[in-house]
Image: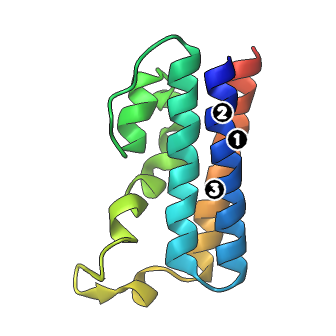
Amino acid sequence: MQKFEKWMAIAEREIQAAESAGQAGFYAEACFWCQQSIEKALKGLISAKGKEFTKTHSLIGLAKQAEVINELRDLISDLDTDYAATRYVVVNDLEDEDLYDKKRFEERFQAAIKALELIRKWIKN
């Protein structure tokens, strides 16, 4: 349980960083932090189950390892792409600002919040 709490503390800081970045208009960065928050929470959930996680940034892969993919797939599918897409200058010939806007950030942020709530709930049960 202690490992889970440490992972969740990082996840909480990262979702706060996402919110701050989004409020400042740094939408790509905010989406990156949303993805990172869920990544850390899933790694915490896997650890809490007494398992070792594969070193990956794939939320889908981590959700499968945590055996919660069915419950999280709709929330994390879009977030899963944000690890790489937010870190490269050009993706699919579109600039960062063309890919990430306020609407996309708000969608990603709400999905991340819901996913974090579910992960917290599962660890309590």
Q: The residue under label 3 is which amino acid type?
A: Glu
Q: CA distance from mark 3 to mark 1?
A: 9 Å
Q: Residue at x 67, y 65 (%)?
A: 17
Q: CA distance from mark 2 to mark 3?
A: 13 Å
Q: Is residue 114 left or right of residue 101?
A: right
Q: The residue under label 1 is which amino acid type?
A: Ala
Q: Residue at x 46, y 20 (%)?
A: 67
Q: Is residue 25 left or right of residue 38?
A: right
Up/down of 42 relative to 18, above or below: above
Tell me the quadrant of the picture where the N terminus can be found.
Answer: top right
Tell me the quadrant of the picture where the C terminus can be found.
Answer: top right
Circle nearer the N terminus (3, 1): 1
Circle nearer the N terminus (2, 3): 2
| SS of the residue under disc 1 | helix
| SS of the residue under disc 3 | helix
Q: Residues within 10 Å of mark 2 (few under 14, many from 20)?
A: some
Q: The residue under label 2 is which amino acid type?
A: Lys
- Look at mark 2 in the image and give the residue it sits on: 6
Discs 3, 1 touching: Cβ within 8 Å: no
The image quarter containing residue 109 is bottom right
What label sits on residue 48 in the rendered view? none
| SS of the residue under disc 2 | helix
What label sits on residue 9 in the rendered view? 1
Instruction: Farthest residue to the top: give it.
Output: 50
Q: Residues within 10 Å of mark 1 (few under 14, many from 20)?
A: some
Discs 2, 1 touching: Cβ within 8 Å: yes
- Look at mark 3 in the image and give the residue it sits on: 14
Residue 16 coordinates in the image, percent (x, y): 72, 60
Residue 80 coordinates in the image, percent (x, y): 41, 52
